[in-house]
Image: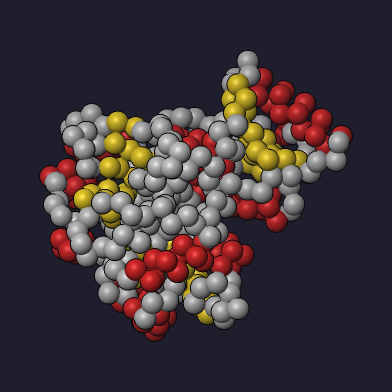
Amino acid sequence: MKKTIFAALDGNNPDRNIIEEAGVIIKNGGLVAFPTETVYGLGGDALQSASSRKIYAAKGRPSDNPLIVHICRWEDMERIVVRIPAAAVKLADAFWPGPLTMILEKSDAVPAETTGGLSTVAVRMPAHPAALALIAAAGGYVAAPSANTSGRPSPTRAEHVREDMDGRIDMIVDGGGTEIGLESTIVDLTGNVPVILRPGFITKEMIEETLQTAVEADRSLPAAGQAPKAPGMKYRHYAPRGEMTVVSGNREAVTRTIVRLAAEKRRVGEKVGIICTDETRSFYDADCVASAGGGTDAETVARHLYEILRSFDSRQVTCIYSEAFSGEGIGQAVMNRLLKAAGHHILEVS
């Protein structure tokens, strides 16, 4: 088993020695997990085919699932894309560095292994000082999916990365908890109309306001045998080990239904976890009850979601019920992740 180096940063302060060591590892074809403002990424040299293959192997990730190329300077776009459309310039001016990934036509500099065999490349510039410094130290192009084993909840703390990646990768850079807690918004700019392939902190409304044009939201899943165009488009993703159901409807009906279902499962020996809000926490009795925050505070819910799912795994929860959350703003991203975690198993009640 590989010996993984653990290195802690002083808050968000990039320690030059740690960053330089991590950069050398990536330049030499190794893998380094590092913090971003969204979740922890698993970084390798985006322009080395072998590095991308190592990322897929470490995650147990299907090789048709594209990786996101992280950059730290706008001018570095020119090497990896064929053409930079006006929409990309506007979005970068508004949201980079930040939690927005853009899909563009790739250049020959990006190997097929990095893009899952697609002719497009996903690019983002993260808004985290350690991430930006590491990307620069590594040569400017770092392919980095979330630093978890494939399908599991994404890591928002270095301890989560250690659970999944200790002994699989060369180094984990600990920068504390992530600020946002959900992966970046992904917008496809290769067609006539921008299409959001994965919702995130940057919402559809924010993108439309910036571009002054309509933006579509892609709710489809890849057809059988078809490669996904962006990370997180597979049917079941971000998933805990326990079977999960999202319950949606008016609050009274939702709480009543979850109370009944949880009691039934516990009677037959299941270990039950419930995801709720501060307002409904007192209604529930289960093996693990976790509030994700105030029901109207979608940003707090987003920040806590993956940590809750991982805590349920650590406590061997076998059955999970989650309240549905508001579908407005970043709430769209929260519901997207919840439904993917539950394999789109949703129960509508009234």
Q: Is residue 190 visible?
A: yes
The image shows residue 286 at horizontal and vertical percentages of 78, 39
Tell me the colour scheme of the image: secondary structure
Instruction: Pick the quarter of the image with the C terminus.
Output: top right
Instruction: Pick the quarter of the image with the N terminus.
Output: bottom right
Viewer-proximal residue, 120 or 160?
A: 120
The image shows residue 171 at horizontal and vertical percentages of 49, 76
Q: Is the residue 338 above or below the residue 29 in the image?
A: above
Q: Is the residue 99 above or below the residue 149 in the image?
A: above
Viewer-proximal residue, 15 or 124?
A: 124
**Residue that lies at the very extreme toward the top in this rendered image:** 350
Q: Which residue is depicted at the point 46% across and 58% down?
A: 146
Badge count: 0
Q: Which residue is depicted at the point 63% across and 19% down?
A: 349
Q: Which residue is depicted at the point 59% across and 38% down?
A: 342
Would residue 227 appear left or right of 297 to someone viewing this image?
left
Q: Is the residue 321 above or below the residue 92 in the image?
A: above
Would residue 277 appear left or right of 49 to someone viewing this image?
right
Q: Which picture quadrant has residue 133?
A: bottom left
